[in-house]
Image (cartoon, helix red, strand yellow):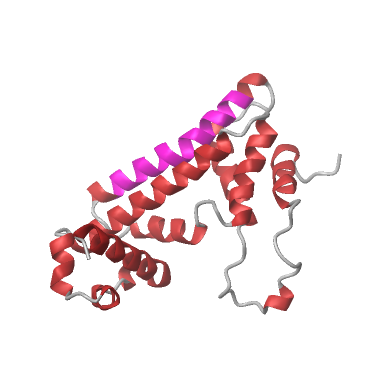
Amino acid sequence: MSPSDTRSRILDAFADELLANGYPGVSLDRIARSVAIRKASLYHHFPGGKEEMYTEVAMRYIAESERVLQTALATGGGLAEQLTAVVTLFARGDGPSTAMGQRLFDATRQVGDGTRSAVSHRYVAALITPVTELMAAAVARGELRAADPGFLAWAFLELAAVAEPMPDDVAMPPEERGGDGPDPELPRRVVDLFLRGAAAS
């Protein structure tokens, strides 16, 4: 197995550990066992140890999320179509995993200032700024009422995340989750809620 394959498998194992246990609960022993290498070999591939692995997993997550977000934002049509494309990513489970995003965010409290700054700045530039720019353009065109575009971007992304499929391990029997699969109208309804609100007209 090539060193790059080993590195990739280590990062996959780290991501699994992070998602399951949070940053404080990440076990380098378990990672080494799952990749079938000695723990000392982890430091050959990642001299910075746990924090270096975290940084690479975070940057990989951000890069993949940026790729799918840009694809959605390149959708033809107007604002509603672009927003619907973004929500559809979440509804299909193709968008940024909110669970992993939360784990990565929580970990910024346990890493050094340099790592925290690098990950935070990259996250905002890749995933928040493009949506903020979309909102700013819509405000300028009069499609959205005058408001802070950054606030609109954060609010929309939080709302879009509710369309993400419920995890299999959620504490709810499958028969109580409702429906026979994803609701194809959910993205449109989420966008309608964002654009028009919940108040009766």
In the rendered image, residue 152 lying in the magenta stretch gets the answer no
The answer to whether residue 189 is seen in the rendering is yes
Residue 149: x, y in percent? Answer: 55, 31
| Image-based side of 144 in relation to 153, left or right | right
Q: Left or right: where does residue 198 sit relative to residue 78?
A: right
Range of the magenta residues? 116-138
Secondary structure mainly formed by the magenta segment: helix
Q: Quadrant of residue 91?
A: bottom right
- In the image, is residue 131 part of the stretch drawn in magenta? yes
Q: Nearer the viewer, residue 117 or 180?
A: 180
Give me the residue at 17% from left, 74% from top: 39
As rendered, which of 166 and 151 lies closer to the eye? 166
Number of numbered markers:
0
Q: Which residue is most to the front?
A: 1
Image x and y of residue 172, in percent: 65, 77
Where 31 falls versus 155 (above or below)?
Answer: below
* Residue 103 drawn above or below residue 152: below
Q: Quadrant of the N terminus?
A: bottom left
